[in-house]
Image (cartoon, helix red, strand yellow):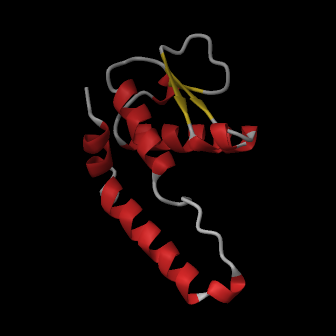
């Protein structure tokens, strides 16, 4: 069974914490530079979804079916498609990645969009 970190390395993605720190620092800098525009700094684009997808792939590496949940439904479908593409790249079974309300899934993964909206 793979770990999320092993999946990240095999997909040649940046380390999660370094990416998140860089994104947050960039957003704070932009907020200070453009203070007159009252930019709201929200923790977006910091790798939460990518980390979740790597965890999905780690879970299916053990042969367990998983479900991905996100809002709106179109985002969920896009995430499922991306996860299945990455699964194929890693030689994993993409059919183990299911979508909304999958009753046969052993593990459920919720994207942050599920709670935000």
Could you tell whether 40 is left or right of 12 in the image? right
Residue at screen point 39% across, 44% down = 89
Where is residue 20 drawn, in percent x and y? Answer: 40, 60
Where is residue 94 drawn, in percent x and y? Answer: 48, 30
Q: Judge by depth and name the residue closer to the eye, 26 or 35.
A: 35
Where is residue 93 drawn, in percent x and y? Answer: 42, 27
Split into 4 quadrants, where in the image is the N terminus? Answer: top left
How many marks do you count on the picture? 0
Split into 4 quadrants, where in the image is the C terminus? Answer: top right
Could you tell whether 48 is left or right of 92 in the image? right
Residue at screen point 51% across, 37% down = 84
Q: Does 26 sit above or below residue 5? A: below
Q: Residue furthest top?
A: 104
Q: Can residue 12 be seen in this view?
A: no
Q: Judge by depth and name the residue closer to the eye, 81 or 100.
A: 100
Could you tell whether 55 is left or right of 40 in the image? left
Residue at screen point 66% across, 76% down = 39
Q: Does 40 sit above or below residue 98? A: below
Q: Does 26 sit above or below residue 105? A: below
Where is residue 21 drawn, in percent x and y? Answer: 37, 64
Residue at screen point 67% across, 19% down = 101
Q: Is residue 113 visible?
A: yes
Q: Does 34 sit above or below residue 5? A: below
Q: Image quarter for residue 113?
A: top right
């Amino acid at each position: 069974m793979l770990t999320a970190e092993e999946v990240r390395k095999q997909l040649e993605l940046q380390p999660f914490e370094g990416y998140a720190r860089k994104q947050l620092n960039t957003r704070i800098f932009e907020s200070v530079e453009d203070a007159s525009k009252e930019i709201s700094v929200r923790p977006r684009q910091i790798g939460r979804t990518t980390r979740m997808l790597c965890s999905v792939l780690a879970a299916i590496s053990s042969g367990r079916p998983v479900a991905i949940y996100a809002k709106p439904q179109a985002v969920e479908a896009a995430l499922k498609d991306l996860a299945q593409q990455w699964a194929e790249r890693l030689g994993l079974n993409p059919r183990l990645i299911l979508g909304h309300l999958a009753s046969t899934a052993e593990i459920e993964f919720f994207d942050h969009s599920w709670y935000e909206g």
